[in-house]
Amino acid sequence: MNPTPWPDAVADVVERAVTTEYASLTRAGTPVTVPTTPYLGERADTIDVSTGLTYPAKAERARTDPRVALLLADPVGAPGTPAVLVQGLATVRDSDLQANTDRYVRVSTAKLPDATKGQPKMVLRRMAWYYARIWVEVTPLHIWWWPSRELEAAPSEWHAPDGTSAPLSDPPPPGRRPGAWLSPPAAWEPLARSMAAQGALVDVTAVGANEFPVCLPAHATAVSSDGIHLRLGPGALALSDGPACLTMHLHDERFTGQENHSFVGTLTSLDTGLLFRVERVLPDWSLAGNKARVAVGFLAKGRILQRRLAAEAARRGQPVPKVRFPARASSSAAS
């Protein structure tokens, strides 16, 4: 039985999806989109994503401007998956870091068991820099869905009842937000060419007429010094020229590694399609290569983030949360 207020097709995608493009807005109104993992909310009326306590930018943008979007359109490991676009209002939760962490350990282990398969719990328990979480609960207002990310025809639609609102976010913590912890790539063009050659999924986000982000699947038809040329399916919603974000991402079917890149720039309509002019590439959390290389890269990031953990917990007046596995945690993590 579908416990959500949304159509069965949408609820099924939320339950099965391992990635979503999560789009939030900067203070200047520019969309910033990053791939992350979606989870059905605990009351089954929200779609939730998380971000690390030690890198809270995704949550802080939503706390400042709650208008966000989610695109669930990743067929890797799930062929035939519909493409679902959600516009909604975000609620940021970081007033109980221990409860947040416990939830993330529980749901991420269940949804992505191969990500920690074979890793001793004693090692995982020392990774609070990763497992300590801020949750962003998205209350859907508008949903569109297509049979696939090709957007072959006009979408089906669902809209929340008039007057639907979302709870307020937890109050922002005092003090200065942490700055960037990774450096961006030096040049965007070689990166975009490499990702396109590998068949990366491409998604583009602009700001819709209702001033919410609109994120849609796209095909990168060419990469040139002018930018990235795009084609959308015939059933796509209209995208406005102006500030935009483009993501390219790759992962295997078991989600044991990932390569994600977000490009910020402007979108321009051409007779031949769309041109995304790149202004900058954002720092990314990519873990590509074989298992050993992924593990080394992950731990290297941990050494940086560990130094931020206590400060971010203290800003919220809370102790550093512990990584606790439920009694019947996945047997894929060795004792």
Image: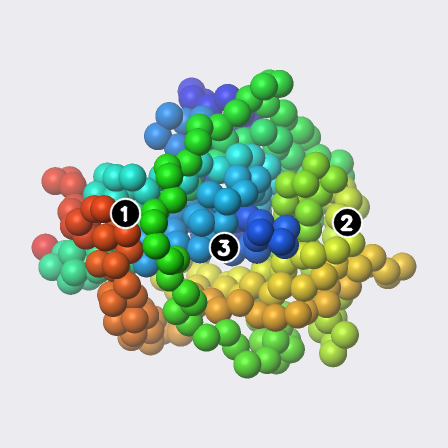
Give the side of residue 315 with respect to residue 163, left or right. left
Q: Earlier in the sequence, mark 2 or mark 1?
A: 2
Q: Is residue 218 above or below residue 291?
A: above
Rendered location of residue 293, percent (x, y) = 33, 76
Seen at 23% across and 46% down, the residue is 317
CA gap, disc 2 and disc 1: 39 Å
The image's mark for residue 298 is: none
Which residue carries the number 1 mark?
316
Occupied quadrant, residue 225: bottom right
CA gap, disc 3 and disc 1: 26 Å
Judged from the image, the secondary structure of the residue bearing numbered disc 1 is loop
Judged from the image, the secondary structure of the residue bearing numbered disc 2 is loop
> What is the residue that sits farthest to the front in this orientation?
175
Q: Amino acid at mark 3?
A: Pro
Name the foreground residue: 255 vs 307: 307
Tell me the crowding category of disc 3: few under 14, some 14 to 19, or many 20 or more residues within 10 angstroms, Cα based.
Answer: many
Q: Amino acid at mark 2?
A: Ser
Which residue carries the number 3 mark?
35
Q: Is residue 136 above or below residue 323?
A: above
Which residue carries the number 2 mark?
240
